[in-house]
Amino acid sequence: MPHRSLVHLALLVAPLGACESEPRPDAAVAVPAGDGDHAQLRFQDNGPHGMHNAGVRAIHEDRQGHIWFGTHLDGLVRFDGRSYTYFDVRGGDRGLNRVWRITADEGGTPWFRTARGVARFDGERLVDHPFRNTPRAEDWTLAPGDLWFAESDPSENAGRAGEIGIFRSDGETFAFLPIPVPEHLRTDEDFAVVGMWRGNDATMWLATWDAVIGYDGETFTVIDDERLGHSDATGYLHVKCMYADSRGRVWIGNNGIGVILVDGDTITNFTQAHGVGRRDRRSGGSLAHPQPGDAPEGAPSLHRVFSIGEDASGHIWFGTTGQGAWRYDGTTLRQFTEKDGLDLEHIAAFYSDRRGDLLIAGTGVYRFDGTSFERVH
């Protein structure tokens, strides 16, 4: 898609508005672990055309050592080391049973981003925080302990003509903040926020399909096709994920043009630099324009990236569709596939647990032992 230029803004502080919260009864069903050391998560059959979205989308380990899994159709699952507890949200409402992100507040309480808003676990049950009609805040601010959530559907903001933005919370009240794009683009779904990450320098990074926007508490940094010099020949941004690593670098995963690396003032196409690019229709450009750094026909490629993470050693991992997982150790880029024990068509999430083990999620959860993978959930 052709690029569109964004604006750079500096904003001030605004108070948060109130948002109604409601506790709800949940059908929490405990399922004992199977034979052996590990159990297997169970998933609904999502059909042959939906498997890219099925399974686990997010992982979080709480302060009690319980592992939480957010799934595409099966809601929340908590593993206590012996059994799984399935929180069948509102009797199987598919919107609320889609959990895309899990985070925790300063007190360790888990918060879950669902297709209807957010929910938190109060130790006994889930408490809803619906987004519909959340008060709007014109100004932005960053504060320690704030929680940030991407919207999944502009219809969540009924009454604002589908305006695109994000939600900020102090743990009790919520506010809707429109993203800093020109007003005529604020209903453009190409600027819907698909991911976010808070870097070690406290910068909040927002990923939209057409741009990545960083906010440091005073000013915005915008990385878009115009800044990157993209054209029909190179293909355009189609952002699916982003990650700010422990060194302050920002990695942007795309469905088509691979990984963009932002390292200080230097921005490069990491995929092309490592010779594993590929032109296809998802790049938004012409198929008739091969680029330097494209992989040979039929060779592995890193052009469709849907998740990025970091392990305890500081290595960067990329999750793809159809091309396995890739690890970058600072020098070498290596691909892991079914021959290494990783039997996932689509990789949706990475997570490093308290032990330092790397977990990789999709239609199952795999642990990396430093050499190969084993399915553990």
Image (spheres, grey):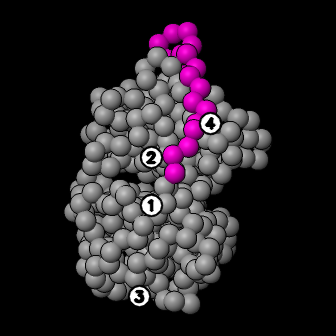
Disc 1: CA contacts within 10 A as few (<14), some (14-19) or many (>=20) = many
Nearer the observer, disc 1 or disc 2? Answer: 2
Residue 318 placed where, x, y %? Answer: 45, 49
Label 1 vs 2, first from the N-terminus: 2
In x, y percent, where is residue 213? 40, 73
Q: Residue at x 66, y 33 (%)?
A: 43
User: Is 40 contained in the magenta span?
Assistant: yes
Q: Secondary structure at mark 1?
A: strand
Residue pointed to by mark 3? 7
- Residue on which the image places disc 2: 120
Q: Is residue 255 above or below residue 112?
A: below
Q: Quadrant of residue 362?
A: top right
Numbered tag placed on residue 88 in the rendering:
4
| Crowd around label 3: few <14 · some 14–19 · many ≥20 (10 Å) | few
Question: Looking at the picture, does residue 67 appear above or below residue 109?
Answer: above
In terms of sequence position, does the residue under pointer 4 or pointer 3 come before the other?
A: 3
> Which circle's residue, 3 or 1, is located before the other in the chain?
3
Per the rendered image, the range of residues in magenta is 22-41
Please name the amino acid that badge 3 sits on. Answer: Val
Look at mark 1 in the image and give the residue it sits on.
149
Q: Secondary structure at mark 3?
A: loop
First of labels 2, 3 by sequence position: 3
- Give SS at disc 4: strand
